Image (cartoon, rainbow, N blue to C red):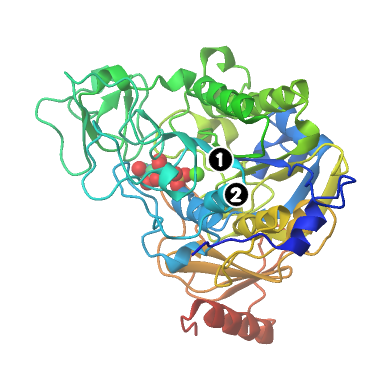
Amino acid sequence: MKKYRLLPLAATAVAAATGCGGQERERQPNVIIILADDLGCGDVSCLGSTVLNTPGLDRMCREGLNLTDAHSAAPTSTPSRYSLMTGQYPWRNRDAEILPGDANLLIREDQPTLARMMKEAGYGTAAIGKWHLGLGKGKIDWNKEITPNPNSIGFDYSYIIAATVDRVPTVYVENGIVPGLDPEDPLHVSYTENFPGEPTALTNPEMLKMKWSDGHNCSIVNGIPRIGYQKGGKSAYWDDETMADVFLEKVKAFIGENRDRPFFLYYGLHEPHVPRTPHPRFAGTSGMGPRGDAVLEADWCVNELLDYLDDTGLSENTIVIFTSDNGPVLDDGYADGAAEKWGELTPALPYRGGKYSLYDGGTHVPFFVRWTGHISPGSTSDALVCQMDLFASLAALTGQVIPDNLDSRNTLDTFLGKSDEGRDGLVLGSNGRLSYRLGDWHLIPPYEGPKRNTPNIELGNSCTWSLYLQSEDIHEDVNLAGKYPDKVREMRDSLSRITGECYR
Ligand code: NG6
Ligand code: CA
């Protein structure tokens, strides 16, 4: 059975008649989602960064819509991306947690996905960049075609890194195949034990050009210690410093090849996630060390892409969405000076916490939408929106019907600046560590655990309920739970109803 069918009403809404009695459809707009990795609102100059100048992102803002209350579904990558791709809350899948580099595909092949929905709508689809949603089934043989892969869940083309830059394997995967492997030197990966004789950060610290501060002490690749062990496959290793250029080239090639039909591109920037290894041409350009330089590299990529769309005449027919998979972090396991450079000025500002946190800074991310000629340049909306809702919203844009059991809600008009109506309520977080937004209120249930983690981020753990009114307390400093017990009860009951868990 076909999962999606064209809704004639919605279709006519998008596709104006061309003078042929409505039979011929106007071409549907291309859609590009650029998803940065760990970029905070406080990293973007037009959102208030006082230490970084980001002309590319400022251009997105100036030429498009700035959604000021936009959220990833969770404060870390895998659950956040899972939700964007499936339109489901990540906490519905217990395995939706930061995945190792050899994890299997987290999304069932028969699960509805944003990519497949766009493909069904007639779009050419590609995933380029960071993936972090797993690959294959069972023990992965990296020397053979790995299936399932992004192409199994709706992408026509994929050129990805399997997980993160700090996790092995340090190779690209193109349509399920590691390009450039030498059969004489097969690639092996393990997350449990090292391969005999292979150097690690612990046995051979003299090989390191970047120091680890926490966790990243397994295999050394390009002088950088990683998470996990790897042996062989050397001819296929990525070069950390040219990764941004490699992805951007693939992006331009995909757009170039698909410019005559609608395309959907999921572009996962790897910056400014650790290890921060921008191309040497960005070294020192931010004055804020490698993390700042990596932000500027990502910013440059965005600017280049916008230029490319302008130059190829595609901007009027391409919706470009820019956002980040979770809030920012400074020292995330490498001693690269980020924490020292930023000091008290966290890149999550003005929001509390950051990556990993239940506080607003965990999921409150930059979100810009540019569609030349359709979205008023420089417009702003403070509606509550979530990346998870792109699924239903883009289904509405393309006239597709999606299953009614998804969590994704159609907020297309808000994403396009035609409405200020956001979500009423939104559950944030993954795997049993959740908070709840209702209007301007943010409720955080009590959770055990440390107040701060090793990256020195306030996690939001507390033995009591916390309730914040963000419209009056943007940094969530004043816990109003004691003052508004009825609000706590109302939101607690909603959270229990939505999640099926009994919050007390
Ligand atoms: C953590 C890593 C961190 C980062 C994160 C995933 C350590 C000590 N920390 O476990 O460096 O890789 O996982 O980040 O290993 S995310 O943005 O992909 O979710
Ligand atoms: Ca991330």
326 sits to left or right of 421:
left
Estimate the x, y position of residue 303 in percent, counting from the top left.
70, 26
Quarter location, residue 146: top left
Q: Which disc is residue 125 wearing?
A: 1
- Pick the residue in front: 189 or 266: 266
- Measuring 21% from the left and 46% from the top, which residue is drawn there? 139
Please tell me whether residue 175 is drawn above or below residue 14 in the rendered image. Answer: above
Assess disc 1: are there few (<14), some (14-19) or many (≥20) residues with their C-alpha within 10 Å of its C-alpha.
many
Estimate the x, y position of residue 478 in percent, counting from the top left.
67, 67
User: Is there a contact, CB below 8 Å, between mark 1 and mark 2?
Assistant: yes
Q: Quadrant of ligand 1?
A: top left
Please tell me whether residue 36 is drawn above or below residue 78 in the rendered image. Answer: above
The amino acid sitting under disc 1 is: Thr
Kind of element beneath mark 1: strand
104 sits to left or right of 377:
left
Query: Circle 2 is placed at which residue position?
Result: 118
Kind of element beneath mark 2: helix
- Measuring 63% from the left and 64% from the top, which residue is drawn there? 401
Quarter location, residue 217: top left
The amino acid sitting under disc 2 is: Met
- Measuring 26% from the left and 38% from the top, which residue is drawn there? 228
Mark 1 / mark 2, whichever is N-terminal:
2
